[in-house]
Image: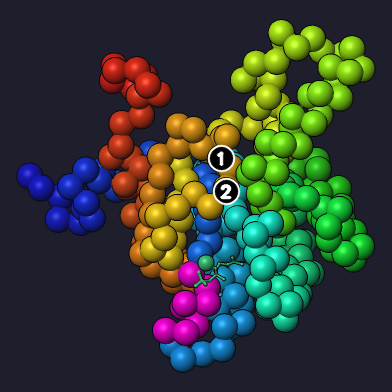
Amino acid sequence: MPNPTATTGSAAPREKLRVPVHLAVTMDGNRRWAEARGRPRPEGHREGIKALRRLVEYCLRYGVPYLTVFSFSSENWRRDKSEIEFIFKLMRAFVDSDLEKLKSNNIRIRILGERKELDAGLQKIIARVETETKGNTGLNLNVAFNYGGKAEIAAAARRIVQFVLEGRIKPEEIDEELFSRMLLTGGMPDPDLMLRTGGENRISNFLIWQSAYSELVFLDEYWPDFDESLFLKTLEIFSGRQRRFGGDGPEQ
Ligand code: IPE
Ligand code: MG
């Protein structure tokens, strides 16, 4: 019998949901959300933080071990200075208001991205967040901030060359596994599910190495509208996909 709650033909029923090991999310559509309501753009970013809080809650509730969110890309510097400052201010406020709760939920936070370009205050906050959650063993929350996938790959290549120059590794030892370890996500599983809200069907330089075999899900809804029903819809779509990793058999 057809499942009347299914949102696409291939979606799995809710009781058979598969939970991803590593969910990566591009939280897009904050400004359009605000514009659609005739509200100032910063309000969209403020609502976006609330949606991020909800996403973390769902990951804890449904047992997602790794969550990576795209919060500021290295390309976002092209925006108005005032908007950039506002986004940074929101991130600082988020740490102030939420860090204790994240810590008590046993969440380990890592910030992925280029730090040297950030002001000293932000660098200090990043160091604090990472140090204070280092010993936590629950949800791994990665916040991609001033992040770009191509820059991450170039940085990994520089590290590898350095190791070769120091004689610590031989060129013939460079393989995919070693390269993966040199990325900012080194030691973590690749995302099995990548979600982007906001209606754009693009990767936009997010985890481009790591997403080689990720299932991609694009939702039209703007990020501030992200709620539990959209989270479950995403899991349903994911659960209905068959991952073959280039092979042809049914998945193990
Ligand atoms: C995503 O929303 C949040 C950030 C990139 C900081 P946008 O700010 O890109 O909002 P839209 O896509 O223009 O609506
Ligand atoms: Mg956008």
**In this rendering, would 152 be left or right of 190?**
right
> Which numbered circle lies on residue 188?
none
In the displayed structure, does residue 134 sit left or right of residue 184? right
* Residue occupying the point 74% across, 29% down: 157
Compared with residue 89, is residue 138 higher up or lower down, i.e. above or below? above
Task: Give the left or right position of residue 28, taking residue 170 as reference.
Answer: left
Q: Main secondary structure of the magenta part?
A: helix
The residue at the point 47 percent across, 77 percent down is: 32
Indicate which disc residue 208 carries.
Answer: 1
Q: Tell me whether the residue at label 1 lies in contact with that at label 2, contact meaning CB atoms closer than 8 angstroms.
A: yes
Give the side of residue 135 with respect to residue 3, left or right: right
On the image, the x and y values in percent for residue 66 come to 59, 42
**Measured from the top left, where is residue 113 in percent x and y?**
73, 49
Residue carrying label 2 = 205
Q: Which residues are magenta?
A: 29-36
Does residue 112 appear anywhere in the picture?
yes
Mark 2 crowd level (few <14, some 14–19, many ≥20, 10 Å Cα): some
What is the secondary structure assignment of the residue under circle 2?
loop
* CA distance for labels 1 and 2: 6 Å
Magenta run includes residue 132:
no
Query: How many marks are shown on the rendered structure?
Result: 2
Local secondary structure at mark 1: loop
Residue situated in front as seen by the camera: 135 or 252: 252
**Which percent across, then down, holds residue 127?**
87, 52
